[in-house]
Image (tube, rainbow, N blue to C red):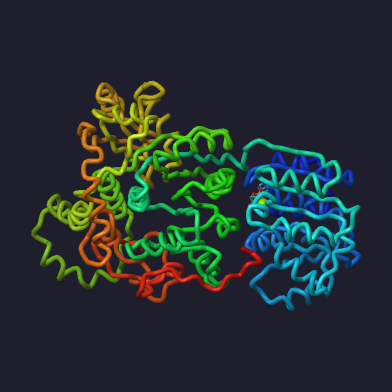
Amino acid sequence: MNKFEALGLNDELLKAIEEMGFTQPSEIQEKAIPVLLSEMTDLVALAQTGTGKTAAFGFPMIQNIDADSRTTQGLIIAPTRELCLQISKEMEKYAKHYKSINVVAVYGGANITEQAKKIKRGAQIIVATPGRMKDMIRRRLVDISKIEICVLDEADEMLNMGFYEDITDILSHTPNDKSTWLFSATMPREVARIAKDFMNSPQEITVGSKNIGASTVSHEYYVVGARDRYAALKRLSDAHPDIFSVVFCRTKRDTQAVAEKLVADGYNAAALHGDLSQTQRDLVMKSFRTKQIQTLVATDVAARGIDVDDITHVINYQLPDEIETYTHRSGRTGRAGKSGISMVLITKSEMRKIKAVERIIGKKFEAKQIPNGMEICEVQLFHLVNKIKQTEINPEIESYIPAIQEVLGDIDKDELIQKMVSVEFTKFLNYYKKAKNLNIDAAENKGNSASFGDSTRFFINVGEKDGYDWMSLKDLIKDVADLGRDDVFRADCMGSFSFFNVEAENVEKILEAFDGYEMDGRRISVEITKRKEGGGNRRRNDRGGRRNDRRNSGGGGRRDDRGGFRGRRSNDSGSSGGSGRSNDRDRSFGDRKKSSSYGGGNKSDGGFKPRRKRRSDW
Ligand code: ADP
Ligand code: MG
């Protein structure tokens, strides 16, 4: 008997489960499903994002539905339209082998009469956002007086968004003897209040922070000056050329502003927030899914529905007001068994919040330093070199070869390599040459940064493509060179290569251990990138930089850490867009041509224009 069968699920569901490729129930599923199948009970279930909550309520709801009746029997309320759609699609998959279970999604920003028509045809299950549901009830387009099960999904988020009244309003139209199942990642006071006011001695299930698969999210913070947040964001992006990230801001205004700046600076970025029209949001999400957008700048609310699996980094441009929300943010990465990094930019005065977040996530943060200009140049240089190596030769180039040979044929190979790489390298070197140190001394990481003083940075030719992340890379190096637990630090894993630091006394050990070292028949080589200078220059030109920042807004001059580094968006060079893949994300450093983007926009006044508000779902 398979594990799902043991939970009491019937054949129709088991078949669908097999087709979806689920082999093991997740912890929340294992705990919730048998209870919900065997008794009519209210339930409060707490589990983090990505733990499989949809199936935990979806399977038992479907099994409890009378498919022969067309009456609406199940209602699922979720905070956003994206989630609504996601849940209803999942539910349809689960119910695939039932002949006549209809699931209808009801959400704002779409035609209400259409939705009403679908319900009229017979919807046993409705998945709805609170605002639209309330609307439909008021206009008598839906009858929920006979529902047997009501699910409140992402309850904490709905209450955060101010849906308390809407929810209580909706619940007042449902029968008293229904079962209410509340699912939430966290249990703030308002959620407890819902449980107390609207549920009958609910059972409680809590599962630990385990996500499905061996996904791991590591948490890092960077202490910067409040005015340096944007510069720091750019550095972090530049230090990870293959980054695919969501940047969280606290307000719609910041979200829009940061996205616009990134676009102006040549990044593939766009904003996602509630003041954009539905069409705009759909476009942004589509471009993000297809990776034409590398950096999505989003509000918490707007990002709730994002179910993109390979997000490499979540960047907290600011910490959220409600620190519980951090869990939702970091849960956007490290999905589907991949590892991810959640980075937080904080000012010195916010340091104590890190402790609070650590308590909530039950994990420690690593204090990290914003990379300096040279480090970024190194990363970009090796990225370029690797890209050249991996580039397939374009047959179209052939006819030009004789002419090119004529120009370059006499240059010997070594020199040619140096020249080629210099074309790009000089540009970013120039850009970052005078870049200031953005790190602020926080009492906590003083020790750390001092110890970087005379450490040595190494390059190693293994990286993420070989299945490593910074943790496993550290382990590899420690094993090979027989070093202690904290001897390898600042490991940064890139696509096909990585960097790490060791103290001076361990440099020889590394060089010896890796001399001629092979792994799976492949030569693993390490090289010293450069020796670190002493750490005495922090904050040296803070002031100059700031003044510059202000003055620059009108002029065209290049300012420190603004503009320039990234070139245009790749799409500009392509035909009509739509097929942009990572390897045409070329950057020509220094090209500052403005490019428009969905959320960014190149409005002449550069200002923020609030668009029509749609209250119901945002
Ligand atoms: P949550 O609502 O807790 O954030 P979801 O229900 O959205 O999580 O599930 C997250 C992902 O895990 C989805 O892609 C889902 O298809 C997948 N999933 C759910 N249950 C299982 C399972 N038992 N085995 C494998 N994958 C699962
Ligand atoms: Mg969910």
Q: Please count the marks in the image.
A: 0
Residue 611 spot, x, y in % from top left: 52, 72
Q: Relative to 104, is 345 on the left or the right? A: left
Q: Quadrant of the C terminus?
A: bottom right
Left or right of 371: which side holds 104? right
Whether residue 313 is visible? no
Q: Please state, as top left, top right, bottom left or bottom right, where the N terminus lies in the image.
A: top right
Q: Nearer the viewer, residue 607 or 427?
A: 607
- Residue 565 placed where, x, y %? 27, 58
Q: How far across and down, in percent of the image, does residue 535 sit?
A: 24, 33
Q: Which residue is nearer to you in this view: 117 or 618? A: 618
Task: Say which of 215 and 329 sits in front.
Answer: 329
Quadrant in the rendering for residue 209: top right
State the residue lying farthest toward the left.
410
Does the rendering let one see residue 467? yes
Residue for point 37% across, 72% down: 602
Q: Position of residue 448 (x, y in %)?
A: 34, 29
Picture quadrant of residue 41? top right
Q: On the picture, is 588 further left or further right than 362?
A: left
